[in-house]
Amino acid sequence: MNAERADPRFELEGRRVWVAGHRGMVGGALLARLADERCEILTVDRGDLDLRRQAAVEDWIGAARPHAVFVAAATVGGILANDSRPAEFLYDNLVIETNIIEAARRVGVAKLVLLGSTCIYPRLAAQPMREESLLTGPLEPTNQWYAVAKIAGIKLCDAYRRQYGCDFVSAQPTNVYGPNDNFDLASAHVLAALLRRIHEARLSGAAEVPIWGTGRPRREFLHVADLADALVYLMHNYSAEGPINIGTGHEISIGDLARLIAETVGYEGEFHYQTDKPDGTPRKLSDVSRMRALGWTARIGLDDGLRQTYRWFLDHQAADGDP
């Protein structure tokens, strides 16, 4: 049974909406997007609520009683972070989503959107990756811990739909970038890490920039403002089991991405590909036909998105005193 509702329209105006993870890149973009929805936005800082503690989550949500929830809180990072902190990536993400979903059920939250990632799909999934590819093959080893946790979250939403009738859905965006991204080289995703490395190489006059892997893997990149818009669109218009992909439908090799960033930054040096380092999944392009059928498509191209992101980086790294 696919628990899909004939009329999924869900209005946010006048309702209390909790953005879990509002301090992150996606959460911050959601706050900006929700400002147009005439809803009451609920947030809580990490210092006041540890989402890994079930009783604390149930107490907070029981007092706040949101009508709708966006689960954007997660432990995230690139290949290096996943590889060096597997227990955190598995445990944190499992308990965060479990605690929020169960607490939402207990207080009668009307609608919940769980945020995942297209890294849930098998390493060698047919391209572009369709939602039906889930669990049809082995995962990419470099991010399997995060992927397993997010797959569990999808299935948990599905199970709560079937057993309790909860209107909980799962959205799987491709690689996200934009303002408020994490530019820490020890934990950043590929685009943010490359942007910072290439920026610093320009400042220092370095002749070359080291890049993990061969540069041949192909990736798809989604601006965070587009993602926030898509998540609100799903809250309004989507109600069904299983994941739904959010992306652009366009891909670029890591090598070409590095060259595009160099052009954006103004760096004229070379790239040294560290072929002893892992590439990760060879190709990761999402099939976004379901989102297009719903009536939503991404609007921000990679060229424009990179320029916006670099301007934000320059403003904030200067303010923070970073290199």
Image (cartoon, rainbow, N blue to C red):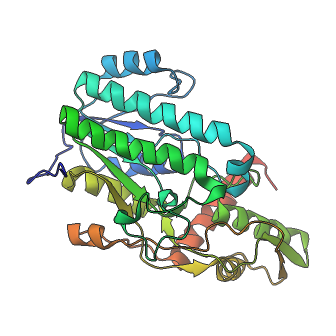
As displayed, is residue 125 above or below residue 260?
A: above
Which residue: 21% across, 43% down? 12
User: Residue 248 at x, y = what percent?
Assistant: 42, 73
Image vertical order of residue 250 relative to residue 16, above or below: below
Q: Position of residue 208 (x, y in %)?
A: 87, 77
| Residue 110 visible in the current orientation | no
Can you see residue 111?
yes
Q: How many marks can you see?
A: 0
Please identify the quarter of the rendering in which residue 289 is found: bottom left
135 or 320: nearer the viewer:
135
At 31% from the left edge and 53% from the top edge, which residue is drawn? 242
Q: Residue furthest front?
A: 137
Left or right? Give the position of 313 relative to 39: right
Where in the figure is residue 207, as x and y percent of width and height? 91, 79
285 or 134, nearer to the observer: 134
In the shown orientation, is residue 218 left or right of residue 318? Answer: left
Res 287 quadrant in image: bottom left
In front here: 270 or 116? Answer: 116
Screen quadrant of the C terminus:
bottom right
- Residue under the point 42% across and 27% down: 99
Left or right placement of residue 155 versus residue 3 in this view: right
Give 75 or 18, whichever is nearer the viewer: 75
- Residue 291 appears at what percent x and percent y? 29, 67
Q: Quadrant of residue 168?
A: top left
In the rendered image, the vertical position of residue 205 relative to residue 10, given as above or below: below
